[in-house]
Amino acid sequence: MSRADGDEGGGGSSETAQQTEKKTPEGKLLDKLSATTSSPGWTKVSCPCCESQRVEPLVLVKLGEKVRPETKRWLMRVIGAPQKDGGAALLAHPGEDATGDIIVLSAPRCTLLRATEELGLCKTYHSGDMEAFSYNDRDNFNDSDNMEAFLTLAERQYIVKYELDGLRAQRDLRIPGLPDSCTLQYRNNIWQKLGSAGVIVDMFPLHNPEQLKELSEAWYSGNQLAQPLDSVNSYFGSPVAFYFSFLDFYTWSLLPPAILGLSITYFSGEAQKEMDESLSGSPVQSIEADSGPVVGGHMIQAVFSMLWSTVVMELWKRRSSTLSYRWGTLHLAERFAEPRPGFHGELGVNPVTGRMEPLFPEWQRDVRIALVSVPVVGLFLGLVVVGMLGFYWGEAQVQQLHTDWDSLLSQTLLYMPSVLHIVYSNVLATVYRRVAKSLTEYENHREESAYEKHLTAKVLVFTFFNCFAVLFHIAFFKQDVPLLRKRLASLLIITQLVNQVTEVVIPFLVDRFISGPHRTESEDDPPEDKFRNQSTLPAFPGLFAEYIELLVQFGYLSLFSCVYPLTAVLLLINNLTEIRSDAYKICKLFRKPFNPPVASMGVWRIAFEVLSFASVVTNCWLLMLSPWLQELCQEGGLTGTNILMLAVLVEHLLILVKVVLAVLIPDEPDWIRKKIEHIEFTSMQALREQKLHSERS
């Protein structure tokens, strides 16, 4: 795959001499795509500075089986047309021939640079500092003439999608080869229209086999403990890199509570009795009569968990800001962008931007949320309650059975209600995530950020209710600490096993025995066939489930670990394997995803902080349930009201301590704060100079 005779390419370095070095069989694929032949090739570029002998294939577009050649040719012209003429200013290659069902896309230098400025990415200036990129000042940025060094692979591939999603019809237009019902109206989103018409059935970024192999060896194939986060960011993008960075940071942060939990369990006879009770499901006679040290251990665990959760999140914010600066996403632009592709409405003039685009009244969206989304979410929360009632009914039945039989079988059956309820909760959560996505689509949000915010909020509300409702009911209403401990042990063990099986084992078996045999390829296969093999992999499901899993873990540890000291130990063991299994999964079992540049974890960080503050209330209440503490208060002549007031006072003091800790630990290092101020200052100067230049001209 290459340029046609006389056609110009772009998007790569002109240093072709360096490309003649010896390469692996996988690396030779890109050379084949860059070789000059006389076959139909890459579309032309209009800018002389974008001419290059080497074009890097970035994205594959798969067309419908019945798409006619004239439709494909028209689509390639639109993709390659300049932006001032309503095109995407990208490079397109027809694949094997003009009648094939794929189009391979790349991007020329100027398109990449302009998109870099629009996205607000920061790049290395000639002074060595990170600066917000300016197209007019591009020559002063390092490597701005070499796109493979200037932008990461993930950024280049996302920019291709970014330009395609922004394609809008400049006038009413009939698409060649399609019926009149598929006519484009003025300002229609072209890419979405072609998708609904069946012209475009799939689009995904292409793997670079050589880079993927190097990343895999440095990430999960060896014995190294440190993760290659910069390489992950370069290949998969900042959302994936931030997730794995947080997973790594959170996992090693589990060491202090794990050591504390082991110490409490080892040195406390009563704690050992509680652990035996949680595993056996029946009371165990304590050898030691004095339970004072145990209560002290649980108190230490509770206070430590409350403070630990605050310190961890504050330190993570500092690390996050450092990574954001290093990856150039610290100053992402909030611009008045085109509506997201899924947005629809009546065509009109946007009163803010003055552009012709679909308009959708805010009140209609509010009505849809109030009359459709809220009741459906409430219905699913009701199903959570039904599952909880079923759990209690089953718990009562097996307890009665164990009392009557008192056998090994009945002791095993004690865990059946917990296991069945966990399976029910996981299935319900899977169904709800799909429903939540459909509801958010129906609400018709204009901006992608608003869509993600509402979708995440729906899932978080349900997840919190689904995962913690039973635990809160047991702790606050039934006040049954042994049952709470047993339930928590079941959740920690069963849920982690279920997650590993569903997320890694099943996809691996499907890939190994079902999908894998159909992707056999040899070195001599055409590049197009190797690209098609990537399309047989399932689409990456995103990081939603991964963040939810970490959030639930964080909740178990910060909210309830004082009744089960080994919580952090079990989570640490799980996460050490989770890092490698997640890395293997994203590298081998799924297609490469598109990932936009992000500056942080986003709304997930807020969710973790909310759980951190909720831990104060939960742990104070659980400590009030301690028989030793209640007996001590009664000996001191304290009434129930006085005990409650004392607990509220302690709770407020601990919240105050958490607030003080949050204030004392800045969200970003001092040098990052100065860098941000410098970037803002230089951006203001560049804007002022641009205005003066416009006025003079």
Image: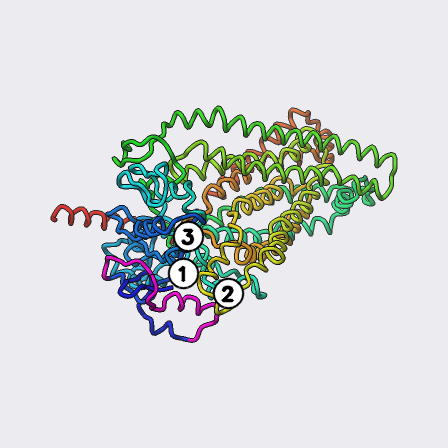
Residue 267 vs residue 458: left or right? Answer: right
Per the image, the residue denoted by label 1 is 96
Tell me, yes or no, whether the highlighted magenta stretch contains residue 31.
Answer: yes
Residue 373 vs residue 473: left or right? Answer: left
What's drawn in magenta, residue-wise? Answer: 22-48
Quadrant where the N terminus is found in the figure: bottom left
**Amino acid type, label 3:** Val
> Is mark 3 in CB contact (under 8 Å) with mark 1?
no
Task: Report the front residue among 121 and 36.
Answer: 36
Tell me, yes or no, whether the highlighted magenta stretch contains residue 307.
Answer: no
Circle 2: element type: helix
Residue 184 vs residue 299: left or right? Answer: left
Q: Examine the rendering and report whether any part of residue 242 can be seen.
A: yes
Q: Examine the rendering and report whether any part of residue 674 can be seen.
A: no
Task: Report the front residue among 591 and 270.
Answer: 591
- Across and down, in percent, residue 522 comes to 52, 67
Circle 1: element type: loop
- Across and down, in percent, residue 533 comes to 50, 58
Per the image, the residue denoted by label 3 is 61
Cα separation between marks 3 and 1: 13 Å
Residue 436 vs residue 361: left or right? Answer: right
- Any mark on residue 213, and which? 2
